[in-house]
């Protein structure tokens, strides 16, 4: 038999069809949704969110995927359900009027469904089938199944009826959710539903250190791989949000684009001026060193570029931050009014760590910022251990890097073991780390800024003095004086001293220049006098020379005349 003919005997495998739930995060965990045309069990203790979970499955299907749904309630009436979920923005009355969903309350009385000593669900099947057919339902919820079998003690009959119910739902081709109360030693009270269900999801509501946390875990999923961890989920005004654990593979995209820190002098300490876009930055220091000011300056600069910034404040209210930043020349309110800056302020004790992570994820996806600030992350230690905080931040950094969002953390450092461990743990995760330290000298406290690390770029190893003024933030070069590095007033005093010395030196040089100029003028005057005297003497000497020449010439002429006279006399009186 040829290879081609043998391959025809084995058609390509088909993956299990899935129905998207519409619940934020759940489809990522289940890799596509719940099994289509099969029943799924949602179990958990009272108050964990089973009814809301299943009801949102019905509503999201009707609104987002055009799949009508039937909700069969055995505990709450339709009006009660409508009131309970109105705060989540679900209008059940309108959905029922538009025939997108159908809610039916069934009061279960064992005497009504038990005939001649036998348990019979035919009445339920008829009623359920009619509801499905009346709106062409694709989704069905039965909430909760305990009420249906609460009076039945025979395990054989119970298992048989469960199989009948589940088979009925499969025959109708609907994707079903059945909710069940958690038992003491099993996932449900009867302990049978989890075995006949194709997908089992366990909801848990626990209290740790007086902090409430809801978690979800997929116990089993026939025919499909799925996430196996516990995932926190949040119930708020938008419904249920499940936070899937981010990928542990380090294959996140990176950028070479730079963004400014908001402090020009700090940008000059980083090669090419600024941090990488999509990187994580930690600013740590003791109380009062200006961490919030640096974070606010970073946010202000982002908003000035027209980018959105989401500011998570765990210590100060937005009004307090806005007021304080006005004193250093930053008006954050204008960015808030333009919709570029949004504050999310809460005390860490409001939620557990996982709930904070869910809330942060949700706020980021809703606002879609380019820059995120968390100030300060060390406050989260009040609701978790150091390792738990680090685990949370790892997942948050992975999520932000995936979205190419630049994040700045601030962290408080103290001389305690907990804070030192936290600082070291966080600093190993981030791409850039700025450390601000108090420098006490000459009876005053000043701030020194260090760039401890900056991955992928050259950076200055110098300590710069960090100053906060009414005109903003700045970094000043430390001054090397005769006795070492000087900062603060000592630096100013040394600068003034040297400036004074320079002035005196310049004055002394100027005075000597003037004295030399006077001496030059006196010397030139003397030279002119001597020159005049020389010329006078020279003229007198020349006069003597001329007179001598004239005398000589006159004498010569006189002598010649005498000679001539003598010669003439001889001729006149010859000798005898």
Image: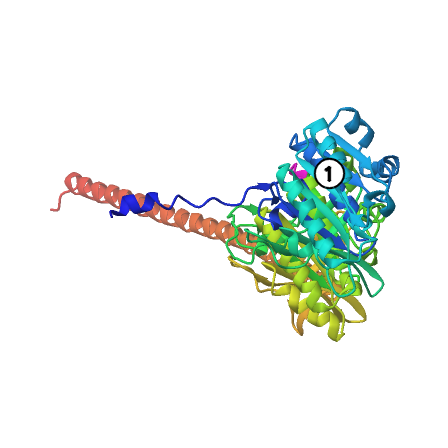
Specify whether residue 377 is painted magenta: no
As rendered, which of 482 and 317 lies closer to the eye?
317
Q: How crowded is the residue under tag 1: few (<14 C-alpha within 10 Å), some, or many (20+)?
A: some
In-image side of 529 versus 125 (left or right): left
* Residue 78 drawn at (x, y percent): 85, 35
Q: Which residue shows up at 15% across the image and 40% down it?
A: 571
Asked whether residue 73 is in view, the answer is yes
Instruction: Relative to 479, say whether 300 is above or below.
Output: above
In-image side of 199 versus 345 (left or right): left
As rendered, which of 155 and 214 lies closer to the eye?
155
Residue 108 occupies quadrant: top right
Residue 501 occupies quadrant: bottom right
* Residue 41 drawn at (x, y percent): 69, 50
In-image side of 44 versus 77 (left or right): left
Picture colour scheme: rainbow
- Residue at the outermost top position: 98
Question: Mark 1 = which residue?
Answer: 125
- Residue at the outermost left position: 576
**Does dot 1 land on a helix, a strand or a loop?**
helix
Q: How many marks?
A: 1
Instruction: Relative to 461, say whether 175 is above or below.
Output: above
Q: Which residue shows up at 21% across the image and 44% down it?
A: 563
Residue 443 occupies quadrant: bottom right
* Residue 309 drawn at (x, y percent): 69, 43
* Residue 154 drawn at (x, y percent): 77, 58
Q: Which residues are magenta?
A: 304-308
As rendered, which of 66 and 130 lies closer to the eye?
130
In-image side of 11 versus 514 (left or right): left
Instruction: Relative to 405, say whether 484 is above or below.
Output: below
As rendered, which of 309 and 544 lies closer to the eye?
309
Asked whether residue 501 is in view, the answer is no
Q: Main secondary structure of the magenta part?
A: loop
């Amino acid at each position: 038999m040829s290879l081609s003919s043998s391959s025809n005997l084995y058609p390509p495998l088909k993956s299990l069809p899935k129905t998207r739930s519409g619940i934020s995060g759940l489809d990522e965990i289940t890799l596509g949704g719940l099994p289509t045309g099969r029943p799924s069990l949602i179990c958990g203790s009272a108050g964990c969110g089973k009814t809301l979970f299943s009801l949102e499955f019905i509503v999201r299907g009707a609104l987002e995927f055009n799949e009508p749904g039937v909700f069969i309630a055995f505990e709450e009436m339709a009006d009660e359900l409508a009131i309970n979920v109105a705060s989540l923005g679900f209008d059940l009355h309108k959905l029922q009027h538009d025939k997108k969903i159908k809610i039916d309350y069934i009061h279960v009385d064992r005497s009504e469904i038990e005939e001649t000593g036998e348990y019979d669900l035919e009445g339920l099947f008829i009623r359920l089938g009619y509801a499905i057919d009346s709106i062409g339902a694709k989704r069905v919820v039965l909430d909760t199944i305990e009420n249906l079998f609460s009076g039945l003690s025979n395990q054989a009959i119970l298992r048989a009826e469960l199989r009948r119910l589940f088979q009925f739902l499969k025959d109708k081709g609907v994707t079903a959710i059945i909710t069940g109360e958690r038992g003491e030693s099993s996932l449900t009270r009867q302990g049978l539903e989890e075995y006949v269900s194709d997908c089992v999801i366990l909801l848990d509501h626990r209290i740790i250190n007086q902090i409430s946390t809801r978690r979800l875990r997929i116990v089993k999923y026939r025919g499909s791989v799925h996430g196996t961890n516990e995932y926190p989920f949040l119930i708020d005004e938008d419904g249920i949000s499940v936070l899937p654990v981010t990928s542990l593979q380090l294959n996140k995209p990176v950028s070479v684009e730079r963004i400014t820190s908001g402090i020009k002098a700090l940008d000059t300490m980083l090669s090419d001026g600024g941090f990488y876009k999509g990187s994580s930055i930690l600013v740590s220091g003791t109380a009062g060193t200006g961490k919030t000011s640096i974070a606010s300056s970073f946010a202000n600069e982002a908003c000035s570029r027209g980018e959105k910034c989401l500011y998570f404040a765990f210590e100060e209210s937005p009004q307090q931050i806005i007021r304080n930043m006005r004193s250093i020349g930053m008006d954050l309110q204008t960015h808030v009014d333009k919709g570029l800056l949004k504050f999310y302020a809460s005390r860490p004790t409001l939620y557990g760590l996982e709930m904070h992570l869910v809330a942060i994820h949700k706020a980021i996806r809703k606002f879609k910022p380019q820059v995120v600030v968390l100030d300060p992350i060390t406050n989260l230690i009040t609701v978790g251990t150091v390792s738990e905080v680090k685990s949370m931040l790892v997942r948050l950094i992975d999520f932000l890097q995936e979205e190419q969002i630049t994040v700045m953390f601030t962290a408080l450092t103290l001389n305690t073991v907990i804070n030192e461990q936290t600082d070291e743990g966080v600093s190993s995760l981030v791409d850039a780390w700025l450390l601000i330290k108090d420098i006490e000298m000459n009876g005053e406290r000043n701030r020194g800024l260090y760039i401890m690390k900056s991955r992928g770029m050259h950076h200055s190893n110098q300590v710069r003095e960090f100053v906060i003024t009414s005109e903003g933030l700045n970094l000043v070069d430390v001054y090397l004086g005769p006795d070492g590095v000087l900062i603060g007033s000592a630096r100013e005093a040394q600068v003034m001293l040297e400036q004074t010395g320079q002035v005196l030196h310049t004055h002394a040089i100027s005075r000597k220049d003037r004295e030399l100029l006077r001496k030059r003028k006196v010397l030139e005057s003397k030279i002119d006098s001597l020159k005049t005297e020389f010329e006078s003497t020279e003229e007198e000497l020349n006069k003597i020379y001329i007179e001598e020449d004239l005398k000589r010439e006159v004498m010569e002429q006189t002598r010649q005349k005498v000679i001539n006279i003598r010669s003439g006399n001889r001729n006149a009186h010859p000798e005898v």
